[in-house]
Image (cartoon, rainbow, N blue to C red):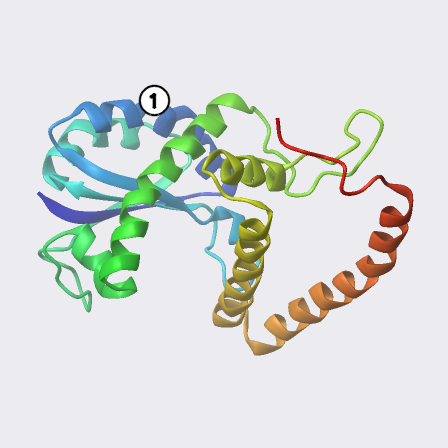
Amino acid sequence: MTGATIEFHFTDVSSEADFIRAYLTDAWPRFEASEYWDHGWFWRYGQFADFESGPDGGFLRLVFDGDPDALIDAESDRWEKFDGLKSWDCNRYDDPDGDHEAFESLLAQQQAAKGAVGGEREYRFKALTARLALDYYRTFDDPLPAVAESGADDPKGIGAWALLHDLLVQCGYHWYDETDITLRMLQNRLKSIAGYAGADAAREEYDRIREAWIEHEAELEDWLADAPTGTMSEP
């Protein structure tokens, strides 16, 4: 078994999304039942195409430990027939192209990038998030809004934020864990914005978040004044 990344370039973002819905949702059970697949995930990039630092069109990576040659032999005919796919390319970690560093496995690559503990954690849970994401695509024909507007039919504005909240509850995290997680995510995303879009973009987003949070104080106080508090309990 060796680590590998297969990069798929699409004519546009909609083709990338179609590839996930029409191909990956069906292909994943084949991957996991096969001898050429040991462990892996996919990573999509089309959502960044509208930003200057994003890809030109749709772009997706299939990242895995397994037998790359056997996977390509089994699946590449399906890729070639997919309308909207411009090209694909495979980079093996044991025999990398160009300036890529060699690694004995995807796990080794993840640990080199993120540390022995962090790399193993992410290696293990990215396979879980890939399955969850594909179930999400199977369940929802249209993407959930990141933050939905509240209204009569949706008073709590249920969107992707609520999906993440529910997942955290189901995994055993409490209120303060969740606020710590959210804070860490905000800090991490600001650094990512800086890395891709520059320091000024990160500062602008920080100012937007800070101003929104300051403005929320008055809304919170009004809500606390009207709502019953300290009366809820878990069954």
Q: Residue at x 22, y 61 (%)?
A: 116
In the picture provided, is 13 more to the left or to the right than 210? left
Figure quadrant of residue 73: top left
Residue designated by label 1: 26
Helix, strand or loop at label 1? It is: helix
Residue 14: x %, y % from top left? 52, 37
In the picture provided, is 208 more to the left or to the right than 102? right
Residue 168: x %, y % from top left? 51, 40
Q: Residue furthest bottom?
A: 199
Residue 13: x %, y % from top left? 50, 42
| Residue nearest the observer in this picture, 166 or 25 | 166
Above or below 233: residue 5: below
Badge 1: residue crowd in 10 Å (few <14, some 14–19, many ≥20): few
Q: Residue at x 11, y 33 (%)?
A: 70
Residue 202: x %, y % from top left? 60, 71
Q: Residue at x 75, y 35 (%)?
A: 156
Could you tell me which quadrant the C terminus lies in?
top right
